[in-house]
Image: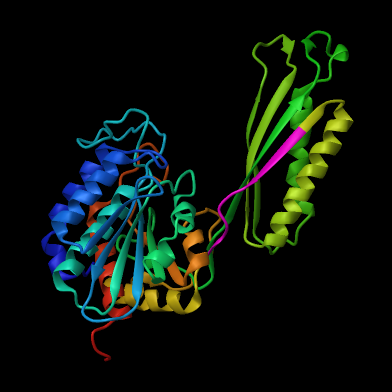
Amino acid sequence: MPVVNRIAEFSADMTKWRRHLHTIPELAFDCPKTAAFIAERLREIGVDEIHEGIAQTGIVAIINGQGGGPTIGLRADFDGLPIIEATDLDYASTHKGKMHACGHDGHTVMLLGAARYLAETRNFKGRVALIFQPAEENGGGAEVMVQEGIMDKFDIGSVYGIHNAPGFVAGGFYTTPNAIMAAVDTFHIDIKGVGGHGAMPHETCDPVIAACGIAQAIQTIVSRNHYALDDLVVSVTQIHTGTVDNVIPDTAYMNGTVRTFDPKVQDMVERRLHEIVAGQAASYGVTAELQFERGYPATINHKTEAAHATEVAREIAGENNVIADAGREMGAEDFAYMLQERPGAYLFLGQGESAGLHHPEYNFNDEVAPVGASFFARLVERSQPLSEV
């Protein structure tokens, strides 16, 4: 895994930073310890500006290059997840019930490593805006940072981000020149029936049976209401009802997720959910209320920027370790909001075989952090060179 020599020299520092961050995971926007650690490292590194308190705990730091030119944005998310860690690491989470189970600690040190190199060398024109973002997992921190004006305030012309990828070759990259991750929506269904004794179901309007009927009918949205070659996922993920074995309950609650790429498909799913819930409720003699919450939009790379990022990735990882058109995934990412505002690209960086993302035994691979930092550094130097080659 070829990396920039100077970044390789301080890779041990990056490992130390990452493992400290792993011990102090924080959630959503409430990440004061994480933000303080990042700001302290940025001051040591010697960036030119540090702007704190964006989206509560987010940070934008500026590094000036040599001479005038555009500003390139590099983003790292830094929030954790509400998961009980099961790694038994020496540097496991000290915040009970919270864990860096998605590698955002690794994303953060990759950007800090790039920042250290870029602040030392400044072998580029224009500026770099280092975007450290909270609340990717929950809350849409990227959207809030955009709403608070970071793109215009810091004159960011393009923006790039990386996410680690368990199961893909360590130090390799993959991306795609168009949509790379799906839009995510959430639905909630509250069912109200008439409970009673489990031995006398004829005296009830059973919300349990209604919930089962609704769950079954929802499956027809994918199988019968959309074109088979359009990507769509509709999953019922929760059904909660009842407390004891011999009582039919009064109520039931259902929840699920919808993943789409096409707004027309998204609209169709919302419409069909309303129709199915109303129709099934009527057929079972219960009442049911649907809430459909639109979440992160699809993450759509810009073709020119994705091609440019791919070439830089090949420089770092080698031709055989980079996939330029890997297709799209049904996961979601709030970096989508930044790509709606500015051209840019989102890439995945392989971290080898490991537990999957959001798993209690997951741990970021420290060996790939210098690769990600090198990618960010070279991306700046290739995007805003001091002289034309």
Is residue 54 visible from the viewing direction of this image?
yes
Residue 304 belongs to the span the image colors magenta: no
Q: Is residue 9 left or right of residue 77?
A: left
Magenta highlight range: 289-300
Q: Position of residue 364 (x, y in %)?
A: 30, 49
The C terminus sits in image quarter? bottom left
Q: Residue at x 39, y 38 (%)?
A: 27
Quarter of the image for residue 150 reads bottom left
Horizontal side of residue 328 vs 149, given as left or right: right
Q: Main structural element of the magenta stretch: helix, strand or loop? A: strand
Quadrant the N terminus occupies: bottom left
Q: Position of residue 98 (x, y in %)?
A: 36, 33
Q: How is the image coloured?
A: rainbow
Q: Position of residue 321 (x, y in %)?
A: 34, 70
Looking at the image, the residue that sits furthest to the front is 153
Where is residue 148? Give x, y as percent: 45, 55
Please say if 27 is above or below 6: above
